[in-house]
Image (cartoon, coloured by chain):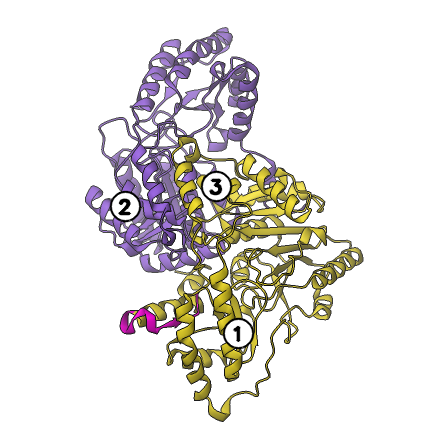
Chain colours: A yellow, B purple
Amino acid sequence: MNVKNLQKGLKPSIIRELFEYSNTLKQKIGANNVYDFSIGNPYAPVPQTIKEEIGKIALSDKNHGYTSTCGDQESRQAIATFLNTTYGSIFKDSNIFLTCGAASALAISFNALLNENDEVILFVPFFPEYPTILSNLNVKIVLVNPDPKTMEPDLNDLKNKITSKTKLVIIDTPNNPSGVLYKEGTIKTISSILEEKQNEYGTSIYLLSDEPYRELIYSKNCYPFITNFYRNSIIAYSFSKVLSMAGDRIGYIAINPEADEAENFMYACVGASRTLGYVCAPTIFQKLIPHILGITSDFSIYKEGREILLDNLQNIGYQIICGEGAFYLLLKALEDDANKFSERAKTFNLIVVPTDPFGLKGYVRLSYALPIQTIKNSIKAFKDLYNSYGDKKWEISKICAF
Amino acid sequence: MNVKNLQKGLKPSIIRELFEYSNTLKQKIGANNVYDFSIGNPYAPVPQTIKEEIGKIALSDKNHGYTSTCGDQESRQAIATFLNTTYGSIFKDSNIFLTCGAASALAISFNALLNENDEVILFVPFFPEYPTILSNLNVKIVLVNPDPKTMEPDLNDLKNKITSKTKLVIIDTPNNPSGVLYKEGTIKTISSILEEKQNEYGTSIYLLSDEPYRELIYSKNCYPFITNFYRNSIIAYSFSKVLSMAGDRIGYIAINPEADEAENFMYACVGASRTLGYVCAPTIFQKLIPHILGITSDFSIYKEGREILLDNLQNIGYQIICGEGAFYLLLKALEDDANKFSERAKTFNLIVVPTDPFGLKGYVRLSYALPIQTIKNSIKAFKDLYNSYGDKKWEISKICAF
């Protein structure tokens, strides 16, 4: 079968491959003896009131019918009001488009915005589904390097990579895979670079902020909300991670009402959504939105696991980049090839993801959305893995991103 | 904004336009005085046990997590078993791919199967979302004419339209907009034509059967299940219409296990699903599947409305094509241009959809998924509309498709 999508399906992502290896290993040696840091599956319980509310919503026939393509008007208004109250934005309901989670928000936005040969800038490390979703659109992907100390983007590199064809820049903060929350100053500088380049080229450059981890922040720092800094900005949001509802497939697109052609963008989203076969986001979860805005799962379990890992891995001697949010951290591999490092980790029943698909060589990603006991039990394995390298490991300096 | 999807969003479908006109009119003169036959929104109640089951499923945290891209294994197995028992097919779980309804099943299948410049055959009248979803894929759409008496496809025309580039033929039975259920003989002849052409050209021609109305049949005739007749066959199914759950976004793709490259097709569906941003179908509704297979809403309300319309409209003098299934029928417009006929119908508070977007000129579609009282009240308006044409109407012969 000679189709463009076959290879993407045939070649499972390294994350899924490791997930399946882990499941097989768990069956063999028992789940408690496998330390699987591979999957970003939210682990905190879904709030009980939300689970019960779904049951109530499901009882009405009208909550099983179609909505308009862009979603239920009341729920869109509720989101606009919530964002305006929380972040001082000025959204109206007509700036909000309900989607089947953030991946769908990305696919619809990309298909609404991008023409062939447009250039799209990704900051390394990036979420691997960006290039997958972009792959059908015949656009050129341009990578911007990170500052290796902070894993924030190298802003000089950004400046150099923007051309007259640049249509879209994507940020993902708190970041998957690093957990790094971009500083307000970083967002400001990105915004002024884009403004300057828009003026220089007479173009519109859109900044899309992918925000599934927006409320998952462990520090006291505020979230630098993108529409407060940049006019041509778009948000892709999902309730998946903050409420452990990844399977419920509900999220939204929000466009800054002051963006160039904000209204046309929404029409283009309707067109894109139809060509992608969405019809509308699941109605029951659309109707749930007014009941869940501002609520999150209890993240204390992630915070505790994160602290245990940080303390212990640095004590062992590992070099770590760990941001203030999400539930991921980066561990520097103890050899050049992070794939080989991940392979060796398996022999200690440690499942860690090489960040090569995220555009970053030499690191593995650890997802700490795991039971505390699993994390505690894993420490010895991390120590044994470290020691197995003897003197052959890289010179380690203890760096943490904050 | 110069994007390929803007026009599709800017130009709302005629169905949606009429729906909005109807809502405005309802506010003005009262809902009971508007006879809105425009929208194919299922009207029969969702079975109470199903609504309650959703609430139960929602109570478990694990039913809010991701599934694999192709869906929950148990639910896929349940579908395979159900189809095999009901239709004598030989599906395995690995031949089933769960989707966000039939539109998503179509988008994923098209993206999994089609390369640029492939030819896709649609039978007139066709569901207007087919060309919309195909529009992103740079394929050539080839139309096959209907037999104007039966609205089944003209099979000689089909034979003439197949070329060495034909990759996909789509059928939709019971049909939207005609309600026509293709006879078993028709399916057999289509199959033998495709077999013959495959042999002639040494190609694989896939036959995709879009089946959201499969269980919505008012006669005693059996459904000619496609895998029993043709090897390279694919099914797109949705629970939307038979259970009045259109907003819940759950359906599936099933590929005949004996099709060429059946296994590769499933891998390609995984790749296509990722590029379209689906991740997985909503998990709660995936988990609901074993509880709803073989159950339908009570269709007696559609049956009664259908009979009232058939009797009365034919008595008035209208020419009707009304198949054995779905909840649609075709009314021949009383002037050349069905758009003008639909406009004039509005002045009698009758909302009917011209079938031009379905590829068929000179007809309007009536959806009879409506309260019986609305249908009864509409008869006088249909009579007044008929009489308003005086002697200028077309020569009418009473034809019904069965």
Q: Which residue is mark 3?
A: A288
Q: Nearer the viewer, mark 3 or mark 2?
A: 3
Chain ID at mark 3: A
- The disc at residue B290 is 2
The answer to if B331 sits in the magenta stretch is no
Q: Quarter holding the C terminus of chain A?
A: bottom right
Q: CA distance from mark 1 to mark 3?
A: 36 Å
Residue A310, numbered label: 1
Figure label count:
3
Query: Please, is residue A150 above or below residue B351 in the view?
Result: below
Label 1 Cα crowd, 10 Å radius (few <14 / some 14-19 / many 20+) = some
Residue A262 seen in the figure:
yes
Q: Residues within 10 Å of mark 3 (few under 14, many from 20)?
A: some
Question: Which picture quadrant has residue B124?
Answer: top left
Looking at the rendered structure, the kind of residue marked 3 is: Leu
Residue A397 in which image quadrant: bottom right
Tell me: residue A390, above or below residue A353.
Answer: below
